[in-house]
Image (cartoon, helix red, strand yellow):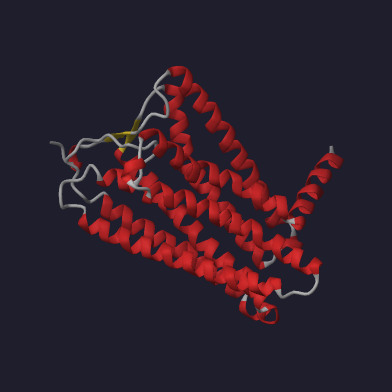
Amino acid sequence: MSNSSSIRHFLLLALADTRQLQLRHFCLLLGISLAALLGNGLIISIVACGHHLHTPMFFFLFNLALTDLGSICTTVPKAMHNSLWHTSTISYKGCAAQVFFFLFFLSAELFLLTVMCYDRYVSICKPLHYGTLLGSRACAHMAAAAWDSAFLNALMHTANTFSLPLCHGNALGQFFCEIPQILKLSCSKSYVRELGLLAVSVCLAFGCFVFIVFSYVQIFRAVLRIPSEQRRHKAFSTCLPHLAVVSLFLSTAAFAHLKPPSISSPSLDLSVSVLYSVVSPALNPLIYSLRNQELKAAVWRMMTGCFQKH
């Protein structure tokens, strides 16, 4: 029986058993991470440099791209290193850092998606009050509140999780450090406090989900009452990318953590965790750029400008 003071490293779940498959997974993760870096980095650059894009919607999209970049950089590099060098270890401090930053960026993404939903609601349902309710100072305060809440949430869970005594070895059933997997290693009855904190976080996430659903019900009712077909199409084009990102993020994360044990298996758990921790942040820039004409125009202007310089 070992305790947490004697554990110096954890063993992560290998993405594959054979060397050939490990190298394939390394190449796959490399491609996905490069796509995420390119897509999110492009959005950050365009919004930061394009003065005509300094609107609440693009300001929050800028922040969302930062969370996607952060979550990718938290989990993928270590998984790529382990696949390339045929190892599965992560240090105790490295695991704690990974838990903190992944939970920080994941929480920030949920809060920012909720704020972005409020932005769409005000824009469509209360357009005359848009400048008052979503001025530059209000947007900055909402973004700061999202980041600060995510920081406190991640700090609270990380400090509490790594203060628990661990008595069941150091092997984690996940390719990155995650709180539910660490709780499985804790001594009996010692993780009740962390389960209580997780329950509070689940209730908070459910509250965000209810707010998003209620807002979109009001948004769609307002859009369907618009007499002009062109204006309806424009309203839908600004809402559908956000709705797609929210659906992808919430569905994969909820299924990963709330699926019944009867259908759980190592391969399924691994596939779903890759979806919400790696694939979702890489797809978000593509989802937003496909339907947003302003963003596509800004990307085109940047690319043509670069070609003309060369």
Q: Residue at x 66, y 53 (%)?
A: 288
Above or below: residue 211 compared with residue 282 = below
- The location of residue 202, given as percent across then percent down, is 37, 60
Q: Nearer the viewer, residue 275 or 169?
A: 275
In the rendered image, the residue lying farthest to the left is 1
Q: Residue at x 44, y 42 (%)?
A: 273
The residue closer to the viewer here, 306 or 27, is 27
In the displayed structure, does residue 73 sit left or right of residue 176? Answer: right
User: Would you identify the image quadrant in which residue 267 lies?
Assistant: top left
Q: Nearer the viewer, residue 21 or 240?
A: 240
Q: Position of residue 149 (x, y in %)?
A: 43, 64
Furthest-front residue in view? 262
Relative horizontal placement of residue 112, taking residue 4 as reference (left or right): right
Quarter where residue 294 is shown: bottom right
* Up/down of 144 relative to 22, above or below: below
Coordinates of residue 225 in the picture (x, y in percent): 71, 75
Relative to 146, residue 287 above or below: above
In the rendered view, tell whether residue 63 sits above or below residue 129: above
Quarter holding residue 64:
bottom right
